[in-house]
Amino acid sequence: MAATARIATGAVIAAAVAASLAGCTTGPGGPGGAGDGAPGPQKAKPAPAPKHVVRLIGDGSTAFTGAQPHLPRPERLKPGQKPPQFVVFSWDGAGEDSQKLFSHFREVAKENNATMTYFLSGVYMLPEEKRDLYRPPQHSPGRSDIGFNDEQGIADTVKQLRLAWLEGNEIGTHFNGHFCGKGGGVGEWSVEEWKDEIAQAKQFVKTWKTNTGLTDAAPLPFDYDKELIGARTPCLEGQRNFMRAARELGFRYDTSGVNNQVWPKKKEGLWDLSMQLVPFPGHSYEQLTMDYNFMVNQSGTKTQGDPAKYDYWGHQMRDGLLSGFRRAYEGNRAPLVIGNHFESWNGGTYMRAVEEVVETVCNKPDVRCVSFRQLADWLDAQDPQVLAKLRSLQVGEAPKQGWESFLSTRPAPAPKGAPGAPAGRQ
């Protein structure tokens, strides 16, 4: 049944491609041609441009389908305008498995006017029997600390990636084998080794049809070489050399570090959009905005700890994230960056916590729950002097004289053609 559905979906794409090509035909039988039944010579009319153009790339695993839908144009802040409160929900190693968490949170996002970033692990697009195609830096071919996938898992993941992108979400990368610590972990990789790892992550996405044999399935609707502009490294290790490699490859941001809740700046030429420290209810220290870190500080290395504490632990994460949100929303309006995994650690309590946070914050006035791409677009559209002024505000600090006074200086006009420039200047 699943295979039949995938073939049917592929047929729809094939029909769209055929329709696009047919719409450009102007030969015999076309408008004004000898076979159109017209009583006499007529001036040929141009065929209407097809609404959905699909241009397959390589083996058809990916395709160019035009501009991404539901991607808003960023606008510069006006003088005295309070910044919006950005919140980024992101997922490491995004893939669809029997838990159906990818599809679930796609629906959660749609229901709450949110878009998110999904950091895909490249080996999730590679079947187990083709594992030797992966040649990880400092490890033998076919090695991966998170395993590989099977045909059904790849087909399910591709479906979710396709739908997520069409809904305005971003597809980033979490690289491949997820090697941490000593003995060849990503923290020991050179710039050139990072480039090789990135190239392989792209390649597995661009050749999943060849590697699975699912040649009739619909492609991913984007050019991954252009779509991929940011990442999070495994275990937040190896950031320095990764960023050097990423800058040379045209990436625009990284989210592999630990920040306070202040406005971001560029590092190594990339926007540093790392996760942040927020209050940890019941503790004097702050906690990183990631489910894994909450878990480690609650149940240690046990991913399924004491069931009697599941609700408490989930509420602790939810309330910590909401405290961080309120601190920014009522204070300096610094973007809040949250990282998660599609896992049912401690009975799934962290998934419930994240869902409650999405439902609580994404529908508030002036709040924009966005992907990293959208946040980077907005930052690029702003006057650098305005961003510098925003960065002068400390954690939770609102302007003493109010936003209108704090940002009253008229910003420099955006250069012609730059993001945020008035439409008439493009």
Image (spheres, rainbow, N blue to C red):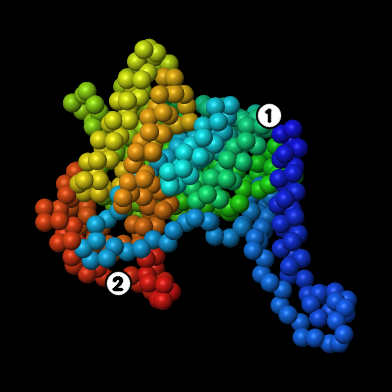
Which badge, 1 or 2, comes first in the chain's sequence? 1
| Residue 413, numbered label | 2
Note whether 264 is above or below 175 in the view shown: below
> Whole-Å distance between the Cαs marked 1 and 2?
56 Å
**Residue 236 visible in the displayed image:** no
The picture places residue 291, in percent across and down from the top left corner, at: 38, 29
Q: How many marks?
A: 2
Res. 96 image quadrant: top right
Element under disc 1? helix
Q: Tell me the quarter of the picture where residue 143 sits.
A: top right
**Horizontal side of residue 62 vs 366, given as left or right:** right
Q: Which residue is rendered at x = 26% and y = 38% of the image?
A: 324
Left-right relation of 2 to 401: right
Q: Quadrant of the C terminus?
A: bottom left
Secondary element at tag 2: loop
- Residue 364 visible in the current orientation: yes
Which residue is under mark 1?
A: 129
**Disc 1 and disc 2 in contact, CB within 8 angstroms:** no
Q: Position of residue 65 (x, y in %)?
A: 61, 57
Kindly identify the residue that appears in the image at 71 percent across and 40 percent down. 6
Instruction: Say which mark, if any, is on residue 313.
Output: none
Q: Position of residue 125 (x, y in %)?
A: 61, 37
Q: What residue lies at 24% left-to-right and 44% top-to-bottom? A: 328
